[in-house]
Amino acid sequence: MIDYSQKKFGVISLGCDKNRVDTEKLLYLIKSRSGILTDDINSANILIVNTCSFLNESRKEAVETVLDCAKYKSGVLEKIAVTGCLPQKYVGETFPELIEADVFLGTEDYDKFFEALDKSYLGQRVNYVGKGENLLTGGRVVTTPVHYAYLKIADGCSNRCTYCLIPKIRGKYVSYPIGQLVEEAASLGEISELILVAQDTTRYGIDLYGQKKLTEILQKLTALVNINSVRLLYCYPDMIDDGLVEEIKSNKKIVKYLDIPLQHSEDRILKLMNRPGGREKYLSLFAKLRKEIPEIAIRSTFITGFPSETEEEFNSLCGFLYEAQLDNCGFFAYSREPDTAAYNLKEQVPYPVKRRRVKRLYAVQREISEKKLKAYVGKKLRVLCDGIDYERNCFYGRAYFSAPEIDGKIYFNSANAEQGKYYEVLITKNDSYDLFGHTEDYIA
């Protein structure tokens, strides 16, 4: 029997914030078995690479990370475990080829981690993909800054977008019970900002309760005394109903911010993507949101270079950005993924064209963002301090219109500021992505 209280565990979590939550639950499991957690890769006896396999680039990153980790086996490193999306979808290819790794677990097998590890210490390479029961619902070791955390309210996806592998990796959409989520959020301690995530947060509850329950879970989470505010990511546009809009509008603890991935603006391309809605519906949605919640910030993501996307349709997408006037955007070149419906579509767009289009979209959004940010110069904003930027020699944080890691920052000087606290910051200048300023007590 292995004494894991004498073992040091290191974890490398790749991919999205939903993957991060899985990693945090695995860390808690390790800690509950008295394992020692370390962020020093040189001292780890057991390294876990929690992988993403959404795109070819993420699969390549996962494999390269495992190969990099294998170099440490010349020191104290004894075992490498590969977990998450890559083995879940591609264990048939990776298990026989990626011999540097000792243990393979899929997205629902984290509860079998120690059982698989025990077998590995008996001298076997272990493939445990598909043997778990997705029972990892206990506590978490939060890996974000202490004042904010992600809460994954569902897993999988049932939307079947033609470019996306998620349903074939994570399975159909599965909501987690309200009581379980409230208990998890209450256990996180004092949280300035709780960020709700899923492949589609707005679909929450339909599979479990027979109706949408996002509004209800928002009410219960914001009733918790340890939760200062709640931010919503990944809202499907056609699932944003009047009840949700009213809850965001009236609930003071809900950040007036919505992340609404659209992926495109043009009706023909959206139909090929198997995405509902269209240009006019999206613009109407934004108009409605801004009418009901004038201060609301809207973020979105877009894919360009989808098969058969014409130059005219691309230019229309650029025009849509000018019309929509979104606060933050992310842009991606279409990635042709095997085992997706879009893989076999004709008129695949050449990579240089896709790359040019992505650059153009970012240029358009920079122009929009710079104008929006310039309007804050000379005004005071309530800023959540995220930490210290030692290179800039100042503090940094975010206003309500920015989510961590994906949106811009506010860099500010202050006589004294604490991580997780809010400050009134006078904005003195901007660029196309960030704002700069100082608190009233700052003396240059």
Image (cartoon, helix red, strand yellow):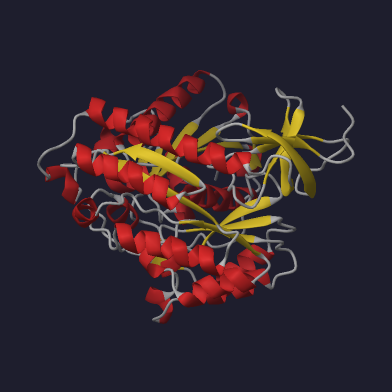
- The quarter of the picture where residue 231 lies is bottom right
The image quarter in which residue 184 lies: bottom right
Q: How many marks?
A: 0
Quadrant assignment for the C terminus: top right
Identify which residue is drawn at 30% across, 33% down.
357
Quarter in which the N terminus is drawn: top right
Residue 245 in the image, given as x and y percentages of width and height: 52, 71
Q: Is residue 54 visible?
A: no
Vertical placement of residue 70 versus 151, above or below: above
Instruction: Specify whether 30 is left or right of 284.
Output: right
Q: Position of residue 112 (x, y in %)?
A: 45, 53
* 360 and 176: which is toward the camera: 360
Q: Nearer the viewer, residue 168 or 121?
A: 168
**Viewer-nearest residue: 321 or 100:** 321
Q: Does the rendering let one see residue 86?
A: yes
Q: Position of residue 352 (x, y in %)?
A: 25, 25
Q: Is residue 275 above or below residue 394?
A: below
The residue drawn where x is 39% and y is 67% is: 174
At 55% from the left and 77% from the top, the residue drawn is 216
Give the quadrant of residue 100: top left
Q: Residue furthest bottom?
A: 210
Pinpoint residue 191: horizontal percent, then vertical percent.
Answer: 71, 56
- In this view of the protein, which residue sits in the foreground, 294 or 117? 294
Q: Residue lying farthest left?
A: 346
